């Protein structure tokens, strides 16, 4: 396994992936104003207190969209300890989320968007909002259970353990604020049960429930890619995320897949020039990137699969990518 700093090309792909997804829930750019579907955050105040583990998870997912707050946090991973300033606001029916690293290189991630959908649209079938669909989708993939209360960030939190039912994904432990259901702490565990990353809120400043609505992303039709992954871990489905970006060229294909908690990004691009990656496995903080050079569509292409998943899973996905019969040799 190759360790150390990624190459320039891998850094570019990592930035694209980070700007596309946030905390395991697919981030969406602002939807068209004509989309009338909305969620009223004031409804959360009327919900009965969660009793089961799945109820706590769903309440937390909605809370993460609907509470406005400022917070300080610490992140502990393979790249060391970093402190962050976090903020979340709702402005004119859209969310604005900012994470600013307070030590080390000055890095800021910002996301503006609306509540995402669970999947691409298929005909007239309903496409639920992510928080409503994720909990049901996790059934059969993870075991959820509550493990008592603790005190974190001067608040009472209930612990939610999420254990994978196979060795194709990582486990999670969440500590959820009992007053708001906002996550105060998250531990990511690898397939051997070892801690990969710890993320913890140290100060949560007066979270306030947004007194209004947040728009849902529009229904999106799936794109016509000339390539596809023949194998994905059970439960991973394509995410309805707009991945075309000025950050990379038109001949770079990028798709996102998720099981509701774990997310992987898949990139396909021609191998040309000096900006290419060494095939093999690369370590990127708590994530891994599997790189393959494959003959696809009549030319050599670089396949990169990134995510917080076991390295063998990422390699298997990369090795399974095939060009569709009859597809043109260039990207759409």
Image (spheres, helix red, strand yellow):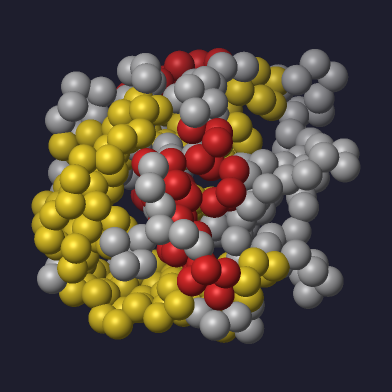
Quadrant in the rendering for residue 267: top right
The residue drawn where x is 31% and y is 67% is: 179
Q: Residue at x 75, y 65 (%)?
A: 37
Q: In this orientation, does residue 292 appear?
A: no
What x and y, as percent, mark residue 40? 62, 71
Percent position (x, y) of residue 107?
Answer: 30, 68
Residue 309 percent across, percent down from the top left: 35, 30
Classify residue 180 as left or right of residue 47: left
Q: Which part of the image, by quadrant, shows the N terminus?
A: top left
Coordinates of residue 202 in the picture (x, y in percent): 16, 68
The reply, left or right, for residue 243 in relation to residue 87 is right
Q: Quadrant of the C terminus?
A: top right
Report the front residue among 303 and 205. 205
Question: Against 43, is 130 above or below?
Answer: above
Q: Residue at position x 36%, y 28% from top? A: 143
Q: Residue at x 49, y 71 (%)?
A: 45
Frontmost residue, 314 versus 245: 314
Up the image or down, 253 lies above or below 216; here it is above
């Amino acid at each position: 396994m190759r360790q150390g700093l990624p190459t320039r090309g891998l850094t570019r792909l990592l930035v694209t992936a980070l700007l596309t997804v946030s905390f395991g829930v697919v981030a969406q750019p602002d939807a068209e104003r004509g989309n009338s579907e909305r969620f009223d955050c004031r409804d959360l105040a009327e919900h009965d207190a969660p009793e089961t583990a799945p109820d706590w998870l769903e309440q937390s997912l909605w809370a993460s969209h609907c509470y406005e707050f400022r917070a300080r946090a610490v992140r502990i991973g393979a790249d060391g300890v970093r402190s962050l300033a976090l903020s979340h606001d709702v402005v004119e029916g859209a969310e604005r989320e900012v994470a600013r690293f307070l030590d080390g290189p000055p890095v800021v991630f910002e996301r503006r968007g609306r509540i995402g959908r669970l999947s691409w649209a298929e005909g007239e079938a309903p496409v639920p909002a992510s928080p409503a669909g994720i909990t049901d989708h996790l059934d059969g993939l993870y075991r959820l259970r509550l493990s008592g209360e603790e005190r974190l960030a001067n608040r009472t939190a209930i612990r939610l353990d999420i254990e994978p039912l196979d060795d194709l994904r990582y486990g999670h432990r969440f500590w959820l604020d009992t007053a708001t259901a906002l996550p105060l702490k998250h531990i990511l565990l690898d397939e051997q049960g070892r801690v990969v990353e710890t993320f913890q809120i140290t100060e949560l400043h007066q979270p306030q429930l947004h007194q209004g609505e947040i728009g849902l992303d529009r229904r999106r039709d799936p794109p016509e890619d000339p390539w596809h992954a023949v194998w994905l871990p059970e439960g991973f489905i394509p995410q309805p995320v707009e991945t075309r970006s000025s950050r990379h060229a038109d001949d770079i294909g990028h798709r996102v897949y998720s099981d509701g908690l774990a997310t992987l990004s898949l990139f396909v691009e021609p191998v040309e020039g000096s900006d290419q990656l060494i095939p093999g496995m690369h370590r990127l903080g708590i994530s891994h990137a599997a790189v393959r050079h494959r003959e696809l569509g009549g030319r050599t292409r670089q396949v990169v699969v990134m995510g917080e998943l076991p390295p063998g899973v990422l390699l298997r996905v990369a090795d399974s990518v095939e060009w569709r019969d009859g597809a043109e040799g260039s990207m759409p």
